[in-house]
């Protein structure tokens, strides 16, 4: 009997499992600490400091040879300050580690992702690429304005993505039954505990509701998984247009489209002009927005690319049920 793990041992093992799978806010102690750091006073202090960092950075950039980057640099500096606070104070480092692992494991999905999403997109976006007005608009977006346009595309994409992800995740806790819990906890630190609790015929759905910070953690995990795939697609589109533009668009054509003298080039061989870089980046950002909308509405794509991650999150919800019940008095188990 002494060799059997205690409830405390099983909970500690489950907490390590949650951290490894990017779900630190499923751990009761961490969630309580994060909740305290998200109170009004700490958030106001962090917000004021982030704004101060952003304004200071913008003023400093305005005095450089590239003053048009002041707004974007200020926003980026403020965002980095908030991210730094999140990593240190809000225990989001496990989420960041999980995101890195997910990004590396998603590299193999780039080819099937491109063949699934790009054909129709490329027909449309290539037409825009050889459109005079697009070149005039994109090439005129200098410095921070171009990056601001790309960030605008990203913000709109996030606005489409977040509500749909939250809606889908809200269904997880409605499907938790004994069979699902036993299957989800198999080969996990809570396998034995799940068998004991299911054998006691406890009503599991009462413990299954996921709300608050735990729901936010699930949404973050799923959004990161989607964002990695969108980023890979954006990079593929950007590189395609750089290569296609360098091969097919002559400098004289760029001059006739832009109407501002000869194209300008970065230091080095005159292969990729600044005008081409601007257009490729602008259309790649638009492609990311387009693909995000397709991804949240195309059921075939979702079934093909989201089955693994959705099953993993559903498993986490079942693991959480057993984890919470291990904290209950022994007679309740």
Image: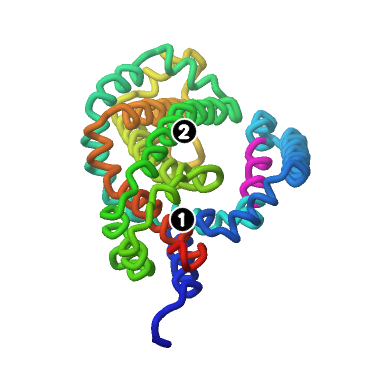
**Position of 299 relative to 38 (above/below):** above
Please tell me which residue is depicted at 41% across the width and 60% down the height of the picture. Answer: 322
56 or 87, nearer to the observer: 87
SS class, disc 1: loop
Q: Which residues are magenta?
A: 75-84
Residue 293, by quadrant, is top left
Question: Can the viewer see residue 50 in this picture?
Answer: yes
Disc 1: which residue: 22
Which residue sits at x=41%, y=35%? 165
Mark 2 sits on what residue? 162
Graded by Cα atoms within 10 Å as few (under 14), some (14 to 19) or many (20 or more), the crowding at tag 2 reads: some
How many numbered circles does the render carry? 2
Distance from disc 1 to disc 2, alpha carbons, whole Å, reads 18 Å
Residue at x 37%, y 43% (from the top left corner) = 172
Q: Residue furthest bottom?
A: 2
Position of residue 113 in the picture relative to residue 85 (left or right) = left
Disc sitting over residue 53 in the figure: none
Seen from this angle, which residue lies furthest front?
331
* Label 2 element class: helix
Q: Quadrant of residue 297?
A: top left
Residue 234 pos. (x, y %): 38, 36
Q: Position of residue 72 (x, y in %)?
A: 63, 33
Image location (x, y in percent) of residue 312: 34, 52
> In the rendered image, which quarter contains the N terminus?
bottom left
Please tell me whether the stretch drawn in magenta is mainly helix, strand or loop.
helix
Q: Residues within 10 Å of mark 1 (few under 14, many from 20)?
A: many
- Image location (x, y in percent) of residue 224: 44, 44
Residue in front for this viewpoint, 275 or 303: 303
Residue 60 shows in the view: no
* Left or right for 289, reference 38: left
């Amino acid at each position: 009997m002494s060799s059997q793990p205690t409830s405390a041992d099983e909970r500690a093992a489950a907490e390590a499992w949650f951290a490894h799978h990017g779900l630190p806010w499923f751990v009761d102690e961490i969630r309580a600490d994060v909740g305290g750091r998200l109170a009004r006073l700490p958030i106001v202090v962090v917000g004021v400091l982030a704004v101060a960092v952003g304004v200071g950075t913008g003023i400093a950039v305005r005095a450089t040879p590239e003053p048009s980057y002041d707004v974007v640099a200020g926003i980026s500096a403020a965002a980095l300050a908030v991210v730094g606070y999140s990593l240190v104070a809000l225990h989001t480092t496990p989420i960041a580690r999980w995101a890195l692992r997910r990004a590396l494991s998603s590299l193999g999905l780039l080819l099937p992702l491109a063949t699934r999403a790009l054909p129709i997109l490329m027909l449309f976006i290539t037409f825009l690429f050889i459109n005079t007005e697009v070149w005039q608009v994109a090439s005129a977006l200098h410095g921070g304005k171009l990056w601001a346009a790309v960030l605008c595309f990203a913000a709109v994409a996030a606005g489409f993505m977040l509500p749909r992800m939250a809606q889908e995740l809200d269904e997880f806790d409605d499907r938790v039954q004994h069979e699902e819990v036993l299957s989800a906890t198999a080969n996990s630190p809570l396998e034995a505990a799940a068998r004991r609790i299911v054998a006691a015929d406890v009503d599991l759905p009462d413990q299954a509701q996921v709300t608050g910070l735990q729901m936010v953690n699930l949404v973050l995990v799923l959004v990161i998984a989607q964002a990695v795939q969108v980023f890979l697609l954006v990079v593929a589109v950007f590189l395609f247009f750089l290569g296609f533009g360098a091969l097919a668009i002559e400098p004289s054509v760029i001059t006739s489209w832009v109407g501002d003298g000869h194209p300008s080039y970065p230091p080095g061989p005159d292969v990729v002009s600044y005008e081409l870089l601007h257009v490729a980046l602008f259309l790649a950002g638009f492609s990311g927005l387009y693909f995000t909308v397709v991804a949240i509405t195309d059921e075939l794509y979702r079934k093909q690319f989201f089955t693994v991650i959705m099953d993993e999150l559903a498993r986490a919800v079942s693991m959480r049920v057993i984890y919470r019940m291990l904290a209950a008095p022994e007679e309740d188990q």
